[in-house]
Amino acid sequence: MLVFKYIEDKAVFQTFYSKLLAKRLINGTSNSHFSEGQMIAQLKQNCGVDYTAKLARMFNDMGVSEELLEHFKGNAIYKEIKGVESFSILVLATGSWPLQPPATNFIVPEELVSCEQTFQKFYQSKHSGRKLNWLLQFSKGEIKTKYISTGKQLTFQCSTYQMGILLQFNEHETITTEELATATSLTKVTLSQTLATLLRTRVLLMEPANGKLTAQSTFRLNTDFKSKHAKVLINVRLEPQQQEDTDETHKVVEEDRKLQIQAAIVRIMKARKRYKHGNLMSEVIQQLQSRFKPKVSVIKKCIDILIEKEYLARVEGEKDTYEYLA
């Protein structure tokens, strides 16, 4: 918090903090919920209720999800799930979490379909007016192996997309990239990234081994796979993906700032009715500098956007003067 006081772009910090907090809560990697709560309390004290409102709702959703899961597992409908040892779920409010919808379609493997259908049935019986959007890109699971040549049974901890690929080998000895694309409905980029993680961890082997990934590349399970551990984490992320996430977050921040600048301009002009360009620029900067320092060039673009949207108009005969259009 001492360092936080010196951060100029507190809006950028908030965006990255909320995304990282969401990952910790979803993946269960937070060391202490008490410490997380203390941090949010101090952010609230420094920046106000609005700054931490979504963070607080995220914690509330986690508590509600735990209660919902208990009711689900205690309900007779839970026994309808077949072929899966255990299943859990988080129900998170769309407006509170910095989570994007999937960038790809995905055909849920037959082995997992009963999980989705059973919970959907249970949830609709409790909340008939609500809609569930499945964010399978954040989901994960465990698969037990029965194919290792040594006879040792391993448990792979993997993403749902990785599960979708690995479960294809219940029916196939080998399978091509094109066949996997058809079976999973993953986009070319997502399929390539997912296959890259399985190849890097040596769970899958590709033929030709040193060739580039093509539609006709063939994959098979590595029956000689070895590990000192009974549980093997193969749900690893590639560095380019992490960089893409960072770049995407910066884009989201920039777009959010433009909206905040436009809102500040409208507030000021609504109160002033007519205002000189220089005065408007100064007041916008003054209003927003507690969260970030808006660039002059961006403010000018936002003024032009509001003129196009007919919120503002340039006053004829008066240089650099705007008027508010009610």
Image (cartoon, rainbow, N blue to C red):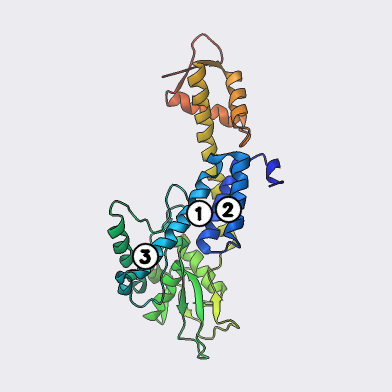
Residue 71, relative to residue 246: is it above or below?
Answer: below
Residue holding disc 2? 37
- The answer to whether residue 141 is left or right of residue 34 is left
Instruction: Give the residue displayed 32% in from the left and 69% down from the top.
Output: 75
Could you tell me residue 165's position as x and y percent? 43, 72
Which residue position is annotated with label 1? Answer: 59
Q: What residue type is labelled 2?
A: Gly
Quadrant containing the C terminus in the rendered view: top left
What residue lies at 68% left-to-right and 45% top-to-bottom? Answer: 4
The amino acid pointed to by label 1 is: Phe
Mark 3: amino acid: His
State the image coordinates of residue 208 (x, y, percent, origin top left): 51, 76
Give whichever of 310, 15 is nearer the camera.
15
Q: Do the residues labelled 1 and 2 touch (CB within 8 Å)?
A: yes
Q: Where is residue 223 in the image (x, y as percent from the top left)?
A: 50, 85
> Is label 3 in a helix, a strand or a loop?
helix
